[in-house]
Amino acid sequence: MEGRRKSLKSLPINRMIPNMLTLLALAAGLSALRFALQERWEHAVLAIAAAAILDGLDGRIARILKGTTKFGAELDSLSDFLCFGVAPAMTLYLWSLADAGRFGWSLVLVFCICCALRLARFNVAGSEENTPAWTRNFFVGVPSPAGAGMVLLPMVLWIQFEADFLRHPGFVAVFMLATSALLVSRIPTFSFKKIGILQSWILPTMAAVGLYLAFLLSAPWITLSLSIIAYMASIPFGFRAHRHYSERYGESPAGPPAAHPTD
């Protein structure tokens, strides 16, 4: 009877909210595939962008509500693979790479495989202990949501400018191969989730976020394009910052603590 009572124990709602957000992200990724099949390219990109926003929220809310679970982490990885691996690759295939025949399909396979390997490596790295605190400010390689944005950049630019060369399979192939390599690379990139904000900068930061959202709503495609380009430009700076920390503090767990977000 005691074991039965334990099995009937209720689950707090705060442990379910992050998983609900992950399922919403998964639904957005699946919807992106549907939009791509219907050649509704703008809707496909927006669905993937919505999945990225939900993906950023679910982990943060799980930590705030103390609802982090192993089940949630596994579900999040499966959702990420579909939303940021399969969905953007298939969207680009239907949009441009189908004209390249077997070569185009090979690029889809390469990108999806690299995304899966990147997520698997991230899950393994997350379970490692005794890593330096400062390494939490960096990812190893490009994270999958950022990779989805980078590989979709030709389509986002094409929606804005409608230049034919942006849709050429050769041009799209360069982005797919480069992004695939960055996903599985050892290049350190900034983990913006760990950036701390000084008290005096909170209000200006909130004002800047509000301004960014205003531009995103009024001019979504140019704003998305500039955001992706800005992230790509940050990669060399992330590499340089990581090397600086590594030379100064080494691989010892001791060292400067990781920056903490305001929440």
Image (spheres, grey):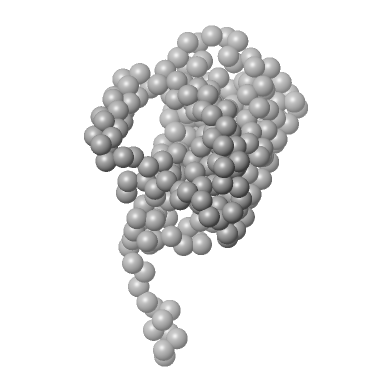
Q: Residue at x 42, y 90 (%)?
A: 1
Q: Residue at x 34, y 58 (%)?
A: 65
Is residue 130 left or right of 207 when viewed as pictured? right
* Displayed quadrant of residue 242: top right
When the figure is inspected, residue 225 is found, relative to residue 235, above or below; the finding is above
| Image coordinates for residue 88, horizontal then vertical, percent | 56, 32
| Image coordinates for residue 197, horizontal then vertical, percent | 34, 40
Q: Residue at x 35, y 18 (%)?
A: 219
Is residue 246 left or right of 220 when viewed as pictured? right
- Residue 50 seen anywhere in this rendered image of the structure: yes
When the figure is inspected, residue 262 is found, relative to residue 34, above or below; the finding is below
How many numbered marks does the figure carry? 0
When the figure is inspected, residue 64 is found, relative to residue 49, above or below; the finding is below
Q: Which residue of the protein is positioned furthest toward the front in this rendering?
A: 248
| Image coordinates for residue 35, horizontal then vertical, percent | 49, 31
Q: Residue at x 48, y 24 (%)?
A: 230
* Displayed quadrant of residue 184: top right
Q: Which residue of the protein is positioned furthest toward the bottom in this rendering?
A: 1
| Image coordinates for residue 129, horizontal then vertical, percent | 58, 60
Judge by depth and name the residue closer to the eye, 14 or 241. 241
Is residue 136 left or right of 184 when viewed as pictured? left
